Image (cartoon, rainbow, N blue to C red):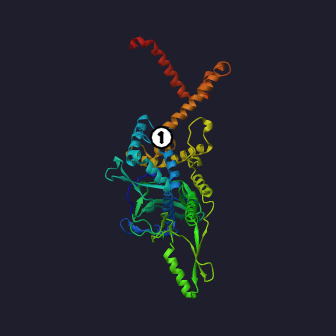
Amino acid sequence: MELFGLEIKRKKSDEAPNVKSFVPPQNDGTAIEIGQDQGMGGFAATGGVIGQFVDMEGGIKTEADLVARYRTMSLVPECDSAIEDIINESISSNDLDAPVAINLDRVNHFSDGIKDKIRDEFNVVLDLLGFRELGHDIFRKWYVDGRLYFHKMVDSNNEKSGIQGLRPIDPQKIRKIREIKKKKDEKTGVEVIQKENEYFLFNNEGFDKSGNNTGQTVKISSDAITHVTSGLLDYNQKVVVGYLHKAMKSVNQLRMLEDALVIYRISRAPERRIFYIDVGNLPKARAEQYLKEVQTAYRNKLVYNADTGEVKDDRKHMNMLEDFWLPRREGGRGTEITTLPGGQNLGEIEDILYFQKKLYKSLNVPVSRLEQENSFAIGRATEISRDEVKFSRFVDRLRVKFSKVFDDILRTQLILKKIVSEDDWKKSKEYISYDFQKDGHFVELKEAEILRERVSTLNDLDAFVGKYYSEAWIRKNVLRQSEAEIKDIDKEIENEGGSEGGEDDMGF
């Protein structure tokens, strides 16, 4: 079987040394593991790169079902509101700057010229993704689905030109496969891991409910696919789950409770009537027929649709709901209509509010954001709630995990254009970070508040400078200035002091 797409060749010197292990590599849930006894994982060639794949353990089915459930959950208004809060906090942009920028301050392996090229290529990556315009949508897809796939399109005749385009792939149509080849050790007789091979299987029609593909499947090189997951793993099923997974139960409970509440209020809110119909001395059969005739003339039944929330009534009569019709024999009080009172305490929705708060907590969103009457105040540090601090740290973790998208695409781009080598990238990858743009107004107010507190503390300690505290200690511990900042500030102060004497030369 031939692989479709880009494949970055490794040098022989880069291959792993002769190190053996009987333990297979840890499965992070992103791939279906197959052994050599399974051939090509059920991937039977029928010509070219086209074949059929049989999933014996149902990993594809599980992943496809999870993605479908997550997407359905995201349509629930309360869940959608919480998701939008998370996305808006994670991705912020303005008309001037990009939503994210690369930070190479900690990278010491590259010269300044190489760093400038890396920054230029990162801007190219943002343009390929359309991240300036579609950053919000891309991040939302990754957060909701719990995984993100891109096909890196490269000109095979001119790989030095780099990536020509990025095309998103539906997670329900692609799966990662890991082949593990074992060999029995001659000395110990233990099967050791000799080789592992990773690739992707793509089916444009998706996979059916049995876990098998219904059409043709393409085997794709792992270097041609950018694959980023949430990093959350269900250890029982060995499958990657999304951030919405733990909120699944809360969403279902909230939806069922709301539907039940609507049905109860529609059925119990109005008063119901009891009709006592005088049937005189009619025979039993004729009395029942007469009662049904009266019912047909006046009775009406409403039907509630839980999917649309509509109350449907095919008949155009006045609603009587679930009235009671009882026959009364001759000698009674004749035809009579009495009324049953409606349900009580219909305005109580504490249970609904409870499950709404539970949903927000399961998504790590502060409950205070659910309560619209509580406005978000940006003030002194003492006014910042603990939940907001936890939420801010959660957003930072999301940004770090999502940044793997940029890592993979940028790595491919730099290697193809011969800007850096594979070894250089491995050495410097851990020192490359990405600065996401934050809400400008919030950051401005926060920095102003911090500066105000530092200046206030500085004024309080001014009388003790030179007696109990040195200027250097004040600048490092109160003003929080680094060594580099102190040098730069001193140089700027010196330059500004030197320029005061030249005011006459400037004509001022």
Q: Amino acid at mark 1?
A: Gln
Residue at image coords 54%, 70%:
321
Vertical arrangement, residue 274 with respect to residue 192, above or below: below
> In what element is the residue under mark 1?
loop
Vertical arrangement, residue 178 with respect to residue 136, above or below: below
Q: Residue furthest left?
A: 157
Q: Residue furthest right?
A: 468
Residue at image coords 66%, 22%:
469
Residue 202 drawn at (x, y percent):
41, 62
Residue 336 drawn at (x, y percent):
59, 75
Pick the residue in front: 506 or 431.
506
Pick the residue in front: 159 or 280.
280
The answer to whether residue 108 is seen in the rendering is: no
The C terminus lies in quadrant:
top left
Pick the residue in front: 101 or 103.
101
The answer to whether residue 447 is seen in the rendering is: yes
Vertical arrangement, residue 333 with respect to residue 42, above or below: below
Place residue 238 in its image quadrant: bottom right
Residue 1 drawn at (x, y percent):
40, 65
Vertical arrangement, residue 492 with respect to residue 337, above or below: above
Pick the residue in front: 487 or 188.
487
Residue 240 drawn at (x, y percent):
53, 58
Q: Residues within 10 Å of mark 1 (few under 14, many from 20)?
A: some
Residue at image coords 53%, 56%:
242
Residue at the spot of label 1 = 437
Residue at image coords 56%, 39%:
377
Place residue 124 in its image quadrant: top left
| Image label count | 1
